[in-house]
Amino acid sequence: MTYEQIKEIARERGIRIGGVKKVEIVRAIQTQEGNEPCFATGRAADCSQLRCLWLKACD
């Protein structure tokens, strides 16, 4: 998913994105989805949030 696509998802959900890095935007979306905000924390191999939109892109 591109950065622009991520920003669009955030905008659609009413998440403020001005001056915010990609990782922080994704974590804000994760929180809104009811998931743990763990994107890019190095825990993808042990992730139990199988319905998370970001699982495939996580590292």
Image: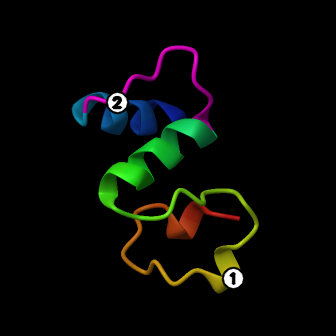
The x and y percentages for residue 35 are: 41, 64
Location of the C terminus (image quadrant): bottom right
User: Measured from the top left, where is residue 22 in percent x and y?
Assistant: 59, 36
- Residue 28 placement: quadrant: top left
What count of labels does the image hold? Answer: 2
Task: Tell me the element at label 2.
Answer: loop
Kind of residue sitting beneath label 1: Ala
Q: Is residue 45 above or below residue 32?
A: below
Q: Residue at point 42% right, 31% down?
A: 7
For label 2, the residue is: 15
Q: Tell me which residue sits at (71%, 73%) in the image.
A: 43
Residue 45 placed where, x, y %?
A: 69, 82
Pointers 1 and 2 in contact (CB under 8 A)?
no
Magenta: main secondary structure equals: loop
The segment highlighted magenta reads 14-22
Identify the image quadrant of residue 10.
top left
- Is residue 24 shown in magenta? no
N-term-proximal mark, 1 vs 2: 2
Is residue 16 rendered to the left or right of residue 21?
A: left
Q: Which mark is residue 33?
A: none
Viewer-closest of 59 and 34: 34
Q: Nearer the viewer, mark 1 or mark 2?
A: 2
Res 45 label: 1
Q: Is residue 10 left or right of residue 57?
A: left
Q: Nearer the viewer, residue 41 or 56?
A: 41
Residue 1 in sight: no
